[in-house]
Amino acid sequence: MDVDKTVDEYYQQILKRNPGEPEFHQAAQEILSSLKYVLRKDDHYADEGLIQRLAEPERQIIFRVPWIDDQGNVRVNRGFRVQFNSVLGPYKGGLRFHPSVNLGIIKFLGFEQIFKNSLTGLPIGGGKGGSDFDPKGKSEHEVMRFCQSFMLELQRHIGEDIDVPAGDIGVGGREIGYLFGQYRRITGRHESGVLTGKGLTWGGSLVRTEATGYGVVYFMQEMMASNKERLHGAKVIVSGSGNVAIYAIEKAQELGATVVAFSDSSGYVSTPEGVDVELLKDVKEVRRGRVSDYANETDKATFHEKGNIWEVKADVALPCATQNELGEEDAKMLADNGCKYVAEGANMPCTPEAIDVFNTRHTLFAPGKAANAGGVATSALEMQQNASRDSWSFNYTDQRLRDTMHNIFRACNDTANEYEVPGDYVVGANIAGFKKVADAMLAQGVI
Ligand code: NDP
């Protein structure tokens, strides 16, 4: 088999069948370039239309979400749920509410989710959803009415054994609460396993809020340890200031690092002496403010309006905001400034060109599907607790998260070594995630 030609044909088919979806093309191309290594050794993974089936979602749902704003105007948004692959378990993946949401973005996220969920070692398939609704500037009642209208349609398609959504950008504990309440009201069932990220008194799990950010830092510890280095004493940049970023900052500082900058879409804040995490949580989680508010309330921080966070000097960078936020020039700047480690807290925040720079400059790089898998893994632990009507302690759940991140790191590292690309965690993660899904798909037949 001419592997390069075959893989290129797969990619051309994906481009043709999915026009106008650049983020999905980008995610597919990254997986396909890693699969070349697999097909060179085991070309049976090209049998039974496996790759074509993998690239085609099992189901894509697009729906109207009408709601009424506080002035009495009718507003119309679009809702999405892409149920990509359920070979390993019920579809699992977050909901994103952001004005940039479209089908291509949900498909890229759903596709990545298949491999990420496989890497966790837990029985969960891949899916993703959301809406182009923008929660920013909306009142509590507008957010609630929107969530209720969104769930009125979504409830037809989800269930604890079918599809289990969670949060993502713009969807946190508040939105999950409104969504769960409406699901319970429509179905008349207290089906706790239908959503994750719930409140602690009604089926939520300890550590779920912290899990993605903590998990990224645990993964970074493993990467540094493999190079005989420690996070303790390191300078760290974390982009974003949402759920993932806040808990990455908290854990990095607990482990003795200094977080010297964080950001939102308006600019970044430099904090040479470290971040006051309690102040940050108060500004962002309680008051739903901006990072400039944080800088206004302490004399140990400076706000750089529209500034580029990647210009800050650091040993470690954790991009935790959104896709394609770190490009080629940013990667060069990081490497020139001595940054040796990058792990993606967000999904696909680094462009392919940036990743090429990291490879040539020997900056060790971890892709999101491995480094940020702690969030979905802990969601799966929430499902386990719901199924057994139990709730676990913080320490036990945190230890499960640490073990999961350790195992994911080992899988990426060992697979990269097996395919003779040591330290290439992109190839390691893609192949380790792919093989489990592919073996299950081949075993279950052409469906
Ligand atoms: P949040 O909504 O809590 O926070 C998002 C943060 O990113 C905000 O600070 C936001 O700033 C910033 N941001 C969003 N869009 C942009 C943009 N275009 N440019 C610059 N900054 C931007 O989301 P999460 O923290 O939950 O998610 C962040 C990333 O992590 C996403 O890629 C998500 O898919 C990924 N992820 C999340 C998981 C989770 O458990 N929550 C699990 C795994 C991955 P602003 O307020 O100005 O928009």
Image (cartoon, grey):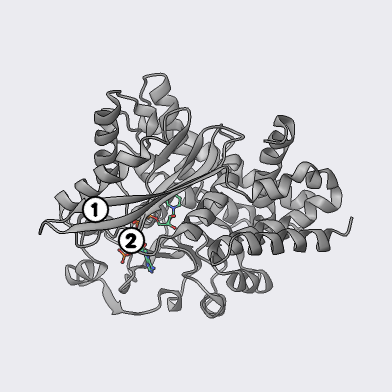
Of residues 230 and 223, the one nearer the viewer is: 223
Which residue matches tag 1? 285
Of helix, strand and loop, which one carries label 2?
loop
Q: Which of marks 2 and 1 is nearer the N terminus?
A: 2
Of residues 224 and 186, the one nearer the viewer is: 186
Instruction: Locate residue 181 relative to residue 79 in the image: left or right.
Output: left
Compared to 260, does 73 lie above or below? above
Q: Quadrant of ligand 1?
A: bottom left
* Residue depicted at 30% across the width and 57% down the height: 133
Amino acid type at mark 2: Ser
The answer as to whether callout 2 falls within 8 Å of ligand 1 is yes
Q: Which mark is residue 170?
A: none
Instruction: Locate residue 226 relative to residue 175 in the image: left or right.
Output: right
Question: Is residue 72 in view from this perspective?
Answer: yes
* Residue depicted at 56% across the width and 69% down the height: 351
Where does the C terminus fall, quadrant-wise? top right
Do labels 2 and 1 touch, CB within 8 Å?
no
Instruction: Locate residue 430 relative to residue 158 in the image: left or right.
Output: right
Question: Is residue 419 in view from this perspective?
Answer: no
Amino acid type at mark 1: Glu
Which residue matches tag 2? 241
Q: Percent position (x, y) of residue 101?
A: 40, 60
Residue 446, located in which quarter of the rendered image? Answer: top right
Of helix, strand and loop, which one carries label 1?
helix
Compared to 447, does 81 lie above or below? below
Q: How far apart are marks 2 and 1 (CA)?
A: 10 Å
Q: How crowded is mark 1: few (under 14 residues within 10 Å), some or many (20 or more)?
A: some
Residue 121, located in which quarter of the rendered image? Answer: top right
